[in-house]
């Protein structure tokens, strides 16, 4: 099976130059790793229950009809309790600024971010363009208006 990649133009800001270009790490991976773009002598320390904006040094130009979702890396969450605060963060197709990742430390120890650390993953996804149509009544379903926990399944 041949897969045609989506072409995404990008540029490095000065502090991102030399980092790895975001890439899927295996043939079946959905996410592309995003690295921290800090100076070699610089670190960001995220104390427990605190959060920080971590620069990626990366700017992208998504094709219209796509978004980039910034998601946590499962290893950081499992090992350190560190995740993306606004998960998933959304990068719109018309945004041209630097991608920054908001990391939060739910762990019990300080979490130190250094240059080149893989801090998040980016998933490129199609966007549905929608139009809402006002109705006086919606079609019925078996679930109806049952909300949180209404299906009896956890």
Image: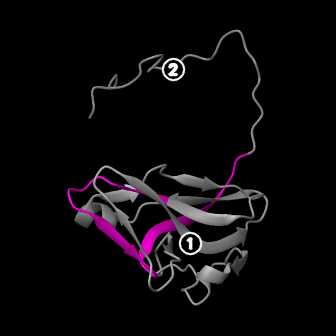
On whether residue 114 falls in the magenta region, the answer is: yes
Judged by depth in the image, the label closer to the viewer, 2 or 1, is 1
Disc 2 to disc 1, how far (Cα)?
45 Å
Dot 2: within a 10 Å radius of its alpha carbon, few (fewer than 14), some, or many (20 or more) residues?
few
Q: Residue at x 55, y 68 (%)?
A: 55
Please state the horizontal and vertical placement of residue 38, each as a whole percent of the image. 50, 77
Circle on res. 56: 1
Dot 1: within a 10 Å radius of its alpha carbon, few (fewer than 14), some, or many (20 or more) residues?
many
* Of callouts 2 and 1, the N-terminal one: 1
Q: Residue at x 27, y 26 (%)?
A: 152
Q: Disc 2 on helix, strand or loop?
A: loop
Q: Disc 1 on helix, strand or loop?
A: strand
**Quadrant showing the N terminus:** bottom right
Q: Residue at x 75, y 18 (%)?
A: 134
Instruction: Find the magenta span and give its range.
Output: 102-128
**Residue farthest toward the front in the current orientation of the protein:** 41
Please state the horizontal and vertical placement of residue 119, each as a whole percent of the image. 43, 70
Q: Residue at x 46, y 81 (%)?
A: 115
Please state the horizontal and vertical placement of residue 12, each as a whole percent of the image. 67, 80
| Left or right: 117 in relation to 131 | left
Q: Is residue 2 visible?
A: no
**Quadrant showing the C terminus:** top left
Q: Is residue 127 above or below residue 2?
A: above
Residue at numbered disc 2: 141
């Amino acid at each position: 099976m041949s897969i045609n990649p989506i072409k995404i133009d990008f540029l490095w800001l000065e502090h991102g130059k030399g980092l790895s270009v975001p890439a899927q790490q295996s043939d079946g991976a959905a996410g592309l790793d995003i690295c921290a773009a800090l100076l070699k002598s610089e670190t960001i320390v995220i104390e427990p229950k605190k959060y920080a904006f971590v620069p990626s040094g990366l700017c992208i130009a998504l094709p219209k009809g796509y978004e980039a979702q910034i998601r946590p890396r499962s290893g950081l969450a499992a090992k350190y309790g560190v995740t993306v605060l606004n998960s998933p963060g959304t990068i719109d197709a018309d945004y041209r600024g630097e991608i920054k990742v908001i990391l939060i430390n739910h762990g019990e120890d300080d979490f130190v971010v250094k240059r080149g650390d893989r801090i998040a993953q980016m998933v490129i996804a199609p966007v549905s363009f929608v139009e809402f149509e006002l109705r006086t009544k919606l079609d019925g379903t078996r679930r109806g208006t049952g909300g949180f926990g209404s299906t009896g399944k956890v």
